[in-house]
Image (tube, rainbow, N blue to C red):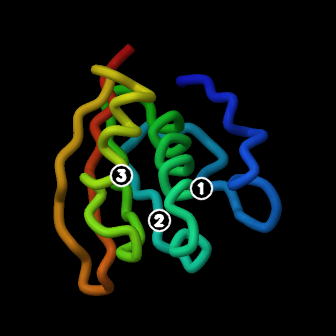
Amino acid sequence: MRTSSRESDPDLDGDVEPITDRVHDNSWSANLEKPHHAGSRGLVVEQAKVAVEHTAGGNHVNLVTHGEHGHPEEYLYDALEGAFGDDLSWEYVEQCGCGGHVTRVYVGEK
């Protein structure tokens, strides 16, 4: 598992529930389109990074991002590349009927 210093990030404190509390040794989906995500692009990015950190190598996580922030290419892909470099690859899957976006992030084996 990748380590993180985001536990003290103000966007992750308070009433915002963690995106996950365990490492997923399978493929899974992270719901980043709840009402509190609509108001904070930074929260979406930070929780997306946490979701990736909690995905075991060789699996993928579907990041379902809030439509309020537009296409994830505009803000998420560079943040993932900056945080994880070549350890990841991703593909845009689709826009949901509700306006959100699904990006599948593949986590490499370590």
Of the image marks 2 and 1, the number of the one nearer the N terminus: 1
Q: Is residue 43 above or below residue 49?
A: below
Looking at the rendering, in which quadrant would you find the C terminus? top left
Q: CA distance from mark 2 to mark 1?
A: 7 Å
- The answer to which of marks 1 and 3 sits earlier in the sequence is 1
> Which image quadrant is residue 11 in?
bottom right
Considering depth in this image, is 32 or 25 the residue closer to the camera?
A: 32
Q: Residue lying furthest front in this view?
A: 74
Q: Which residue is mark 1?
A: 19
Comparing labels 1 and 3, the label whose residue is closer to the camera: 3
Question: Label 1 near label 2: C-beta < 8 Å?
Answer: yes
SS class, disc 2: strand
Tell which of 8 and 104 is nearer to you. Answer: 8
Which mark is on residue 60? none
Q: Is residue 72 left or right of residue 22?
A: left
Residue indicated by mark 3? 75
The residue carrying mark 2 is: 31
The type of residue carrying mark 3 is: Tyr
**Quadrant of image for the N terminus:** top right
Question: For numbered disc 1, what is the local secondary structure?
Answer: loop
Whether residue 110 sits left or right of residue 8 in the image: it is left
Rendering coords of residue 37 (x, y %)? 54, 69
47 vs 100, left or right, is right
Amino acid type of the residue tagged 1 in the rendering: Ile
Between residues 11 and 60, which one lies in front from this camera angle?
11
- Residue at 70 percent across and 53 percent down: it is 12
Mark 3 vs mark 2: in front: 3
Task: Examine the image and state in which quarter residue 71 appears.
Answer: bottom left
**x, y percentage for residue 79?**
40, 39
